[in-house]
Image (cartoon, grey):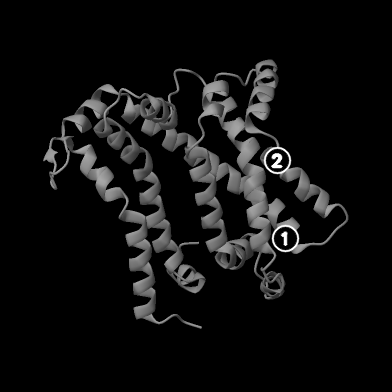
Amino acid sequence: MTMNPRLRTLILAIAATVLLLPLIPLLAWSFTTFWRWPAVIPSFDGGYWSKLLTDGGILPALRNSLILSGAVTFLSLALSFFAAKALGTRNFRGKRSIELLLLIPTFVPQIAVVFGMQAVFMKLTLYSNFIGLLTAHLVFYAPYATLLLSAVFENFDVSLEEQSRTLGVGRLKTMLFVTLPAVRPGVIVTGVFCFIGSWSVYLLNNVIGDPRFKTLSGVIFPLVSVGNNSYSTMAVAIIVYILPVLIILILISKALANSPGDIVKKGLL
């Protein structure tokens, strides 16, 4: 059943208001040096933005975080796709045990897992380098993506693939034009969760990663936690931290608005 366009617009407007309204005071604080009662409008000054962006190492850390989280998201989806399909579409002995094993990184306190990984990664020469840090992220988010995608594949009609192959379509084209369009929304949502999770990691980056490879969380979190920083400095830091996530959410909302049929017709898959 198709949703009424007016109702859909109203729901989107309410969701946007709930999401963006709390950011207005934060945005105002990031451009002010003085805002006290009874002043309704602050005295605006962009000095905090220029100072933090030029002297705080924010831009290199932002680049590093985008590279790391993007790679984690792509590899998590690539590694988990076929495993999730098997878990979601087939029933076999030991299936529940496998799902339970995939939950272990979530059950065990992260600090215990991270410091245990540190000792192992030192022996494997994966300590204090980008490949090791990427691998450490995948330890957490590849199983997470597998569980999420397996739930998506539980609602996938396998007979669609069988009909496609019966008509002479190869396995690759069947996956690209039948399977992927059918599970595309679930894949996108799973990727977003993996990206946000990797984006917010702090302890893992500091323990496993190279100290020279600064991520945004490693720069922002200490900056916000220091009590002698002004509201304006913290507001700028928080906005820089959450802005990429907001942009991604806006982009994927547009992607999810297209139906699978539209995607196939446009040749995007």
Residue 215 at what x, y percent from top left?
43, 29
For image coordinates 67% across by 29% down, the residue present is 113
Q: What is the C-alpha distance between the residues marked 2 and 1?
A: 22 Å
Residue 240 at what x, y percent from top left?
32, 38
Above or below, 138 against 148 in this view is above
State the image quarter where residue 90 is shown.
bottom right
Above or below, 202 against 10 in this view is above
Residue 88 - label: 1
Q: Is residue 178 left or right of residue 36?
A: right
* Residue assigned mark 2: 107
Q: Nearer the viewer, residue 215 or 135?
A: 215
Task: Compare marks 2 and 1 and give the one earlier in the sequence.
Answer: 1
Q: Nearer the viewer, residue 226 or 137?
A: 226
Across the whole image, how many numbered discs are drawn on residues?
Answer: 2
For image coordinates 51% across by 34% down, the residue present is 201
Q: Residues within 10 Å of mark 2 (few under 14, many from 20)?
A: few
Residue mark closest to the camera, 2 vs 1:
2
Residue at the farthest front position: 38
Q: Is residue 104 left or right of residue 56?
A: right
Residue 14 at what x, y percent from top left?
35, 66
For image coordinates 77% across by 43% down, the residue present is 101
For image coordinates 21% across by 30% down, the residue present is 48
Q: Nearer the viewer, residue 184 or 250?
A: 250
Three-letter amino acid code of the residue under disc 2? Phe
Residue 81 at what x, y percent from top left?
64, 52
Q: Residues within 10 Å of mark 1 (few under 14, many from 20)?
A: many
Residue 133 - label: none
Three-letter amino acid code of the residue under disc 1? Gly
Q: Is residue 244 left or right of residue 80?
A: left
Above or below, 127 against 215 in this view is above
Q: Is residue 68 left or right of residue 9?
A: right
